[in-house]
Image (spheres, rainbow, N blue to C red):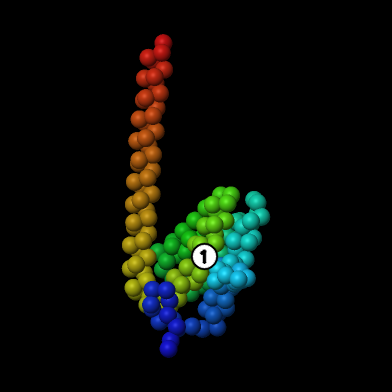
Amino acid sequence: MAATTREGFPIARDNRLEQLHRFAFWLDEGIRLPGTRLRVGLDPMIGLVPCFGDAAGAVLAAVILAEAVRRGVSRFTLGRIAYNIVLDALLGAVPLVGDAFDFVWKANLRNVALIERHVAVPGKARKADRLFVVVLSGSLVFLCGALMVVGVVLTAWLFRAIAAHR
């Protein structure tokens, strides 16, 4: 039976993709915790080092991004891969919560799966990633707008409160 991605697409593996998958496996879940079914990788363990660990993890994850660029994946897929790296680095930097997030998120394996999906079904991958980027961009625009509105409302409230006490 042929290997498939998480989404069920068939994987046409080559040596370089195999190496990339092995690299991501060791970063995200290469070590089994004794007596459990849980797996942890080097990325969450490196992330435990304050100020350095999550940046080092992002640099290691950039290897996967570079391979995606080399393979000519769409800009939308590259955007998704970059999003996973940034999210992993930013949330991973939050003490304790970030370490738990690193343990669960497994961004490197997600990113390799995106490359595998691109190799298996490039058109379908491009369409799905375009939708993801559009939704993400729309959400960010909405969030920025909402923050601006909240800022204006709070500023007006503050000025009214100050004026009422004079």
Residue 90 percent location from the top left of the image:
53, 52
Q: Quadrant of residue 155?
A: top left
Q: Using the rendered image of the protein, determine whether residue 91 is visible from the camera's viewpoint.
A: yes
Rendering quarter of residue 133: bottom left
Q: Is residue 26 above or below residue 3?
A: above
- Describe residue 49's horizontal placement relative to residue 37 as left or right: right
Whether 126 is drawn above or below 11: the answer is above
Taking the view exactly as shown, the residue that stands out farthest to the bottom is 1
Residue name at image x 34 percent, y 57 percent: 134
Residue type at mark 1 is Lys
Residue 92 appears at what percent x and percent y? 55, 55
The quarter of the rendered structure image containing the C terminus is: top left
Q: Which residue is mark 1?
A: 106
Q: Position of residue 142 (x, y in %)?
A: 34, 46
Secondary structure beneath label 1: loop
- Report the label total: 1
The residue lying at 39 percent from left, 39 percent from top is 147
Q: Residue at x 35, y 35 (%)?
A: 149
Asked whether 63 or 154 is in front, the reply is: 154
Q: Nearer the viewer, residue 27 or 61?
A: 27
Q: Is residue 115 left or right of residue 53?
A: left
Point out the image quarter for the N terminus.
bottom left
The picture places residue 136, in percent across and down from the top left corner, at 37, 55
Task: Examine the rendering and report whether any part of residue 29 can be seen.
Answer: no
Most extreme residue toward the front, as rendered?
35
Q: Mark 1: few, some, or many residues within 10 Å (few <14, many ≥20)? A: many
